[in-house]
Image (cartoon, grey):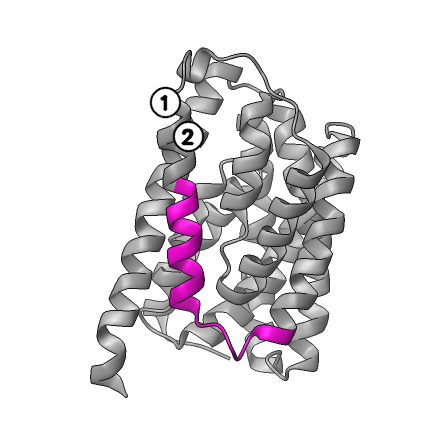
Amino acid sequence: MITDWHFYVLAVPAVMLIGIAKSGFSGVGLISLPMLSLLIPPMQAAAIILPILMVQDIVGVIALRRDYSPRNLILLMMGGLCGVVLGMLLAKQVSDAEVMMMVGVVSCGFVIVTFLRKGGLEAPAKTGSVPAGLFWGLCAGFTSFIANAGAPPVQVYLTPQKLTPATYAGTFAILFAVLNYVKFAAFIWLGQVTLPNLQVSFVLFPLAIGSSLLGVYLIRRVKALFFYKIIYALTFIVGLKLIYDGVLQIWLAPAGA
């Protein structure tokens, strides 16, 4: 178990950001894994974060269990589970950098197209098609397993529909609750779950629960238009960061080889 106090100085805000992100403000949690990776290996950081996500998933699902879109959830879930399986099969063939760049370009492109089209944020709500739901769900499951970047594909699909903030957050919470539990089983199979890492996760569980409840409190009180302005902004910022991280990894790869 990690006892270095420097780690917990970073872990506390990282877990709080994840908790708030689980309630719909998904972009704010992206920095959590890089924060922990400053002091421990990225794979160990991911193994510590995943059980925390699973606890926060329970809180989110209980709090938002009546606020979700059944149609969207079914489509995204079907695609997402296939994406996780695909991620397991291709984990060694596709680099994190390539996946991050792909997701980053899609995220930024989605926001740019939204603002360039007639009406921008004021454009009428658009129901997502069945093929689109399955496709973006597949992308979310795959990128979540490979690079912990499953949120942007779901945002691309859900955001144009202009669901209420609570419905958006509930659909998001239930989807990733299922995907994260499936991922955890896969991580066990791959030998990435260890007792010391689980002990660290356990220490952080109370903070994880508290931050998730804070996120639910905020999501029920924010106005829809303001909520979607935040989502679009976070999607674009997250996209830029993913592109930057992907390019940086590819650029530095030859030197580290």
Residue 107: x and y in percent read 42, 42
CA neighbours of label 2 inside 10 A, class few (<14), some (14 to 19), many (20+):
many
Position of residue 164 relative to residue 29, above or below, is above
Seen at 58% across and 16% down, the residue is 125
At label 2, the amino acid type is Tyr
Could you tell me if residue 8 is visible in this image?
Answer: no
* Residue at image coords 69%, 45%: 134
Q: Is residue 95 magenta?
A: yes
What residue sits 74% from the left and 29% below the top?
Answer: 69
Choose mark 2 or mark 1, whichever is in front.
Answer: 1
The x, y position of residue 255, in whole percent, is: 20, 83
Q: Residues within 10 Å of mark 1 (few under 14, many from 20)?
A: some
Residue at image x 42%, y 25%?
Answer: 114
**What is the chief secondary structure element of the magenta stretch?**
helix
138 shown above or below 193: above
The correct choice, above or below, for 142 with respect to 26 in the image is below
Q: CA distance from mark 2 to mark 1?
A: 10 Å
Q: Which residue is mark 2?
A: 232
Identify the image quadrant of the C terminus: bottom left
Q: Which residues are magenta?
A: 89-107
Q: Are marks 2 and 1 in contact (CB under 8 Å)?
A: yes
Residue 115: which disc? 1
Query: Outermost residue toward the bottom?
Result: 257
Which structural element holds mark 1? helix
Depth check, front residue: 239 or 42: 239
- Residue 173 point in image, percent of width and height: 66, 42
Residue 229 location (% of width, % of height): 41, 23
Q: Amino acid at mark 1?
A: Phe
Q: Is residue 176 magenta?
A: no
